[in-house]
C-alpha cells in the first residue's frame, strides 16, 4: 500500500536487572533481555506539532539509548515529510484510526504522547494497553483524577510511565535542587518563581480552548513554576491562595491569562509564584539564611543559566530532551521507575486543581 493511500483519511541513569533465576530457566528470555540491553530502544512520537518537530525529533538524533522509530499523525503530508526526513519505514507510521496496531510492532518500545492535553489520558491508556511504555508530555492531564486513571492503567499493564519533565536532567536545575533540598546555605527563607510569555499566536489554537487545554497560562507555563518550587524545596505544598488578571479578555476568552499564587508548606512557610500568557517571565529566585541562588532563564528550551551568591553556575548547556529520553530508555531496559513518573505529574495537577478552585472561591484552598 502506498504511503499516501495509507493516510488518505484524517482521523542521570538508574540500575536494575531481570531475575537471574528466570534467565537461567529461560534461555530465550535471556537472549531477549540481552538483545534489548544492546540495542537502542525505538520511540514513536504521537502528534507532530511544534514540540515534536522543533525539539523532540531533533533531540532524538543525539540520543544514545533510543531513536526515532515511528510516528503517529492524522495528516498525510506530515507522514510523507517525516518519513523522508527521518528515514521512517512505512510499517512504523500510524494514524489515529489504526494506532492500536502499534501493539504488534517490535520496533517500537516507547510511545511519547505529544498531543493536546485533553488527549493525554486516552493515548496514555491506549499505549499501555498496547504493551508499550509511555512518556506523556506535561501538563499530564486535564485534572488530578485523570492522572490517577493514567497511572492505574499503566500499572495494570505493567508498563512504565514517565512525564516530560526535561529539567530534572538539566545540570543548573539539578544544582538548584541540591542547594534547596540540602539547605546548603541554611533554611530557605524566600522563594519566588515565574514563567510566561506574551502569546501572539493563532487565536483559534487549541491552547486557547478550555476543553482541549484545560486552562491557559497556568497549565502551559505555570506547571514549570509549580515544579520549580516543589523540586527546589523537595516538599509538597498543603494549601494555595490565588488571584488573576486578564488584560486581553477578547483574546483569552476561555482560558486564564495571568495568575499569581502563594503556596503554603508544612510548618507554615510560604512561597510565591506566577504564570502568564501576557508577560515574559522565566526565573527561580531563592534566598536561604546565609546565601542565595537563582535560575534565569529557568525553564526554556534554549538553555538554562544560574548563579550562586552572584557567581555564575559553571555548568554546560545540554540537549535537555535527549537526556530525558535517554534516561527513560535506560529505565525501560532495567525495569526501574523513572525519576519523573506519573506520580510527579499527579502532584503538580493537584496544585493546579487547587489554584483554579481558589480563583473561584477567593479563599485559601487545601491541596489534594
Image (cartoon, rainbow, N blue to C red):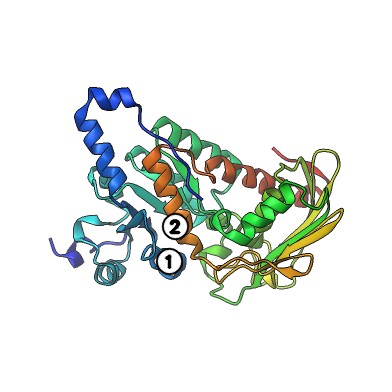
The label number, if any, that marks residue 9 in the structure image? none
- Relative side of 231 to 54, left or right: right
Q: Quadrant of the N terminus?
A: bottom left
In the image, residue 165 above or below residue 303: above
Q: Earlier in the sequence, mark 2 or mark 1?
A: 1
Residue 295 position by quadrant = bottom right
Would you call the spot at circle 1 few (<14 residues within 10 Å), some (14-19), or many (20 or more)?
few
- In the rendered structure, the answer to whether residue 367 lies left or right of residue 110 reads right
x and y percentages locating residue 305 in the rendered image: 65, 69
Residue at x-position 57% and y-position 46%:
345
Task: Report which residue position mark 2 lands on.
Answer: 114
Q: Where is residue 251, by image quadrant?
A: bottom right
x%, y% of residue 52? 42, 64
Q: Quadrant of residue 104?
A: top left
Label 2: which secondary element: loop
- Residue 145 or 87: which is nearer the viewer? 87
Q: Which of the two residues, 337 or 171, is positioned nearer the viewer here?
A: 171
Picture quarter with the C terminus = top right
Q: Is residue 69 above or below residue 132?
A: below
Within 10 angstroms of label 2, few (less than 14), some, or many (20 or more) residues? many
Q: Residue at x 45, y 67 (%)?
A: 55
Callout 2–callout 1 Cβ contact below 8 Å:
yes
- Residue identified by numbered label 1: 49
Residues at marks 2 and 1, CA–CA distance in whole angstroms: 8 Å
Residue name at image x 20 percent, y 61 percent: 89
- Left or right: where does residue 330 sit relative to residue 220? left
Residue at image coords 37%, 50%: 111
Looking at the image, can residue 46 be seen?
yes
Residue 9 in percent (x, y) is at 26, 61
Amino acid at each position: 500500500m502506498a504511503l499516501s493511500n495509507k493516510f488518505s483519511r484524517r482521523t542521570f541513569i538508574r540500575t536494575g536487572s531481570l531475575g537471574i533465576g528466570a534467565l537461567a530457566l529461560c534461555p530465550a528470555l535471556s537472549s531477549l533481555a540481552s538483545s534489548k540491553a544492546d540495542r537502542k530502544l525505538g520511540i514513536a512520537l504521537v502528534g507532530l506539532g511544534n514540540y515534536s518537530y522543533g525539539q523532540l525529533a531533533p533531540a532524538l538524533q543525539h540520543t544514545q539509548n533510543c531513536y526515532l522509530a515511528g510516528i503517529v499523525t492524522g495528516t498525510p503530508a506530515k507522514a510523507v515529510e517525516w518519513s523522508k526526513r527521518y528515514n521512517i519505514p512505512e510499517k512504523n507510521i500510524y494514524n489515529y484510526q489504526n494506532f492500536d496496531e502499534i501493539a504488534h510492532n517490535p520496533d517500537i518500545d516507547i510511545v511519547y504522547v505529544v498531543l493536546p492535553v485533553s488527549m493525554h489520558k486516552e493515548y496514555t491508556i491506549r499505549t499501555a494497553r498496547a504493551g508499550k511504555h509511555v512518556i506523556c508530555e506535561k501538563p499530564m492531564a486535564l485534572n488530578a483524577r485523570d492522572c490517577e486513571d493514567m497511572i492505574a492503567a499503566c500499572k495494570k499493564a505493567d508498563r512504565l510511565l514517565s512525564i516530560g519533565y526535561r529539567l530534572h536532567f538539566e545540570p543548573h536545575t539539578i544544582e538548584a535542587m541540591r542547594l534547596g533540598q540540602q539547605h546548603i546555605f541554611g533554611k530557605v527563607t524566600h522563594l519566588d518563581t515565574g514563567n510566561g510569555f506574551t502569546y501572539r499566536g493563532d487565536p483559534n489554537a487549541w491552547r486557547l480552548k478550555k476543553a482541549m487545554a484545560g486552562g491557559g497560562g497556568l497549565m502551559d507555563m505555570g506547571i514549570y513554576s509549580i515544579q520549580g518550587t516543589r523540586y527546589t524545596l523537595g516538599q509538597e505544598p498543603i494549601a494555595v491562595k490565588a488571584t488573576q488578571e486578564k488584560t486581553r479578555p477578547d483574546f483569552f476568552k476561555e482560558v486564564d491569562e495571568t495568575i499569581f499564587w502563594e503556596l503554603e508548606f508544612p510548618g507554615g512557610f510560604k512561597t510565591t509564584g506566577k504564570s502568564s500568557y501576557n508577560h515574559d517571565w522565566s526565573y527561580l529566585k531563592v534566598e536561604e539564611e546565609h546565601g542565595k541562588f537563582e535560575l534565569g532563564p529557568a525553564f526554556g528550551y534554549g538553555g538554562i543559566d544560574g548563579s550562586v551568591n552572584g557567581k555564575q553556575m559553571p555548568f554546560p548547556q545540554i540537549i535537555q530532551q535527549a537526556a530525558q529520553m535517554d534516561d527513560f530508555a535506560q529505565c525501560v531496559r532495567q525495569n526501574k521507575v523513572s525519576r519523573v513518573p506519573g506520580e510527579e505529574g499527579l502532584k503538580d495537577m493537584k496544585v493546579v486543581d487547587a489554584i483554579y478552585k481558589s480563583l473561584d472561591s477567593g479563599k485559601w484552598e487545601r491541596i489534594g
